[in-house]
Amino acid sequence: MRQRTTSLTAALVATVLAAVPGCGGPAAVRGAPAPSASVPPPGPTGRAPRDFAGRVDIGGGRRLWLSCKGSGGPTVVLESGLHDSSDTWTFTETRPPVPKAPAVFPGVAAFARVCTYDRPGTIRYTDPPALTTRSTPVTGTRSLTAMAAVLDKLLTAAHVPGPYLLVGHSFGGMITRLYAQQHPDRTAGLVFVDAFGTNAKPYFGAQWPAYLRLLNGPGTPFDADPAFERADVDGAAAAVKAAKPLPKVPMAVLSKTEPFAAPAGSPKAVLAPLERAWPGVQQALVELGNQTPHLLATGSDHYVQLHDPDLTIAAIRLVAGRALAGR
């Protein structure tokens, strides 16, 4: 029986799971101690220490939780899906006969510097689930442009060395995509982990407004909390389309093969077009680059990094190698 907190949060803003009442977080993070506030001091080279986990001041009275580990370039940045904290990169849910594999964060740290962070209002997979207290709360619906700008502020304030290999899960793929379009000189490569794109809306027809409502109000215990992460989905697609083209960097796309793990009672009128849209969404991501590998995580649902961490790590290693070879 899976113990991941799940809920419906998926597609255009691409995240199909968040947290539903009554679900416990994974044992690996249950009872995790609250972090102390800290800022990574630059080392003698002006860069942050090799291993760091703490809060970084990004200005405006805001701090974000950042965790970095390992060494070697390009620096890998892991971006979670909508409503998800960085917890999704730090544990696994592999099932027999797949052997137990390291989670993506420590697995990547074995060959490269890797960083991940908590966006405000995202869900920690604790027991019980809770909104992160590690990053300063904010309210209101957030634009994709603002999310990408916050990522840039964080990486700059924390002295995280670039260029970056950006890994985006679900809606996180929209954030990393826009960041790469805005900062081509700081982008070494892209890995899309069952990520969302900009071409899903036509598949939904009249159900699109209902889908958008479900994305930002997926039935979690936190839906009514003003600090709960909400995104301007239509605006996100428009921002990507209006930005400059992606830089010509190595890419890879990982895609699920199983249905979205939506909770019981989720409206079929919305889930059906979502499943129809997903293959087209994934193919459009593949076509963003030249000779982009498309890796199918057989037997995995939307959370490929949990169910198939070794495949996710292998894709990151592949793109990292190509990025280094292309320098």
Image (cartoon, rainbow, N blue to C red):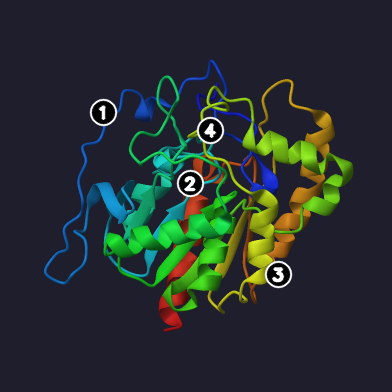
> Which quadrant of the figure has residue 49?
bottom left
Query: Which residue in the structure is indicated by mark 2?
Result: 309
Query: Which residue in the structure is indicated by mark 4?
Result: 95
* Mark 2, other Cα within 10 Å: few <14 / some 14–19 / many ≥20: many
Can residue 148 be seen in the rendering of this structure? yes
For the residues carrying marks 4 and 1, which lies nearer the camera in this image? 1
Name the foreground residue: 100 vs 25.
25
For the residues carrying marks 1 and 3, which lies nearer the camera in this image? 1
Total residue callouts: 4
What amino acid is at disc 4?
Answer: Arg
298 is higher (above) or lower (below) than 71: above
Query: Which residue in the structure is indicated by mark 1?
Result: 33
Q: Where residue 37 sits in the image (x, y, percent)?
A: 21, 41
Residue at the spot 56% in from the left edge and 26% down from the top edge: 224
Q: Where residue 209 sits in the image (x, y, percent)?
A: 78, 41
Q: Which mark is residue 287?
A: 3
- Sequence order check: which comes first, mark 1 or mark 3? 1
- Sequence order check: which comes first, mark 2 or mark 3? 3
- Sequence order check: which comes first, mark 4 or mark 1? 1
What amino acid is at disc 3?
Answer: Glu
Residue at the spot 64% in from the left edge and 56% down from the top edge: 236
Name the foreground residue: 255 vs 25.
25
| Quadrant of the rendering where the C terminus is positioned | bottom left
Q: CA distance from mark 2 to mark 4?
A: 11 Å
Q: Is residue 261 left or right of residue 82?
A: right
Q: CA distance from mark 2 to mark 3?
A: 24 Å
Q: CA distance from mark 2 to mark 1?
A: 25 Å
